[in-house]
Image (cartoon, rainbow, N blue to C red):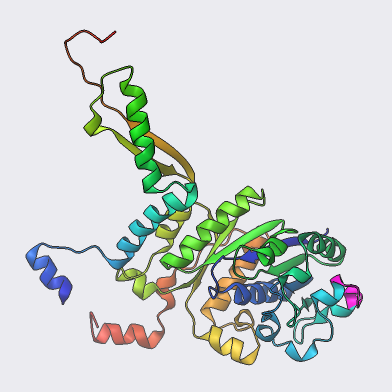
Amino acid sequence: MSSFFSRLTGRRDASSAETAKERLKLVLIHDRTDISPAVIEVLKDEIIAVISRHVDIDRDLVEINLTQNNRESRLVADIPLINSPKKRRG
Amino acid sequence: MPATVVTITSGKGGVGKTTATANIGVALAAGGQRVVCLDADIGLRNLDVVMGLENRIVYDLVDVVEGRCRLKQALIKDKRLPDLHLIPAAQTRDKSAVSPTDMVRLADELRPDFDWIIIDSPAGIERGFRNAIAPADRVLIITNPEVSAVRDADRIIGLIEAEEKGPAELILNRVRADMVKRGDMLGTADVLEVLAIELIGLVPEDENIVVASNRGAPAALDGNSRAGQAFRNIARRLNGEDVPFMNLDESKGFFERLARLVRPGG
């Protein structure tokens, strides 16, 4: 009956199997690489420091993520540049 | 041809390693192939009781390794199948009584006389696990559709890759089609997506497994057991046959299906 009411109200909770899969995916990303979220934060800070020594970047929008595809792990960094009209600092 | 060594392992305990070892061994031997099942779980032996051979043990794995008997003396013949044998683990020793090198030497000694050597690995990732995978030509990882079991399977997959024993193949055990259907259990596709390895077996939850272990007669001997059928399919796939995976949803018996017709949605 709960499915009847949830359909009626248009709300749908994730099934416990979906929750299990999402939790597994997250936990395995860190199990597989031995890189904790805390380490990612440190990496992020240091990458920002290094890159902003050379180019202007939007620090608040920098994202460093661990991703996985078929058991291969990679770090993906998305670092937005600031396209300011002003001259580059030299 | 010398035997292929297949190690069955899981990381987590209680997911069905010993049951799978016994049943796959039985299924291969029932097909006329020469099989030895080897219990590598020293200190916590159980393959003997699952196979119903506990009363025939004189010597064990550690006796062979320490030279107290010849290998042939520790080989127990199965009661039902002439081509099936067991080498039991020692019960009063621990994993350190045997080394990975001992296991490789033992397997090499067995290879000429058998088609299959099936090794039942202990749980964990320590010495006992290292012993069990050392001589493996193929590694089957068994898991259940639960977060903790899948997580441990993933860890084992990584270790097998690191040891260059891969690619490991997966047995998904104790699947309940009714729970998968209502979204309360991880399905085969979910587990395969997360683990990204090949599937070699899909085994439904089956009360017959408990009955079989009560009696010491593996379910693969029972033509009516669904899990037994699934293990027989795994044996055929090990032999290179292309066997379609069971549609677990058909597991409903005639009366259950009838009941559903009479009481839709019930």
Q: Is residue B32 visible?
A: no
Image position of A88 with respect to A26: above or below: above
Residue at (66% x, 81% y) in the render: B46
Q: Give the residues drawn in magenta, as a range.
A: B65-72
Residue at (84% x, 61% y) in the render: B105
Q: Position of residue B123 (x, y in %)?
A: 60, 70
Quadrant where the N terminus of chain B sits is: bottom right
Q: Position of residue B225 (x, y in %)?
A: 54, 82
Q: Is residue B81 visible?
A: yes
Q: How many marks?
A: 0
Q: Position of residue A72 (x, y in %)?
A: 49, 42
Image position of A36 with respect to B186: above or below: above
Toward which corner of the image does residue B177 lie, by quadrant? bottom left
Majority secondary structure in the magenta region: loop
Image position of B118 with respect to A82: above or below: below
Q: Is residue B209 left or right of residue B92?
A: left
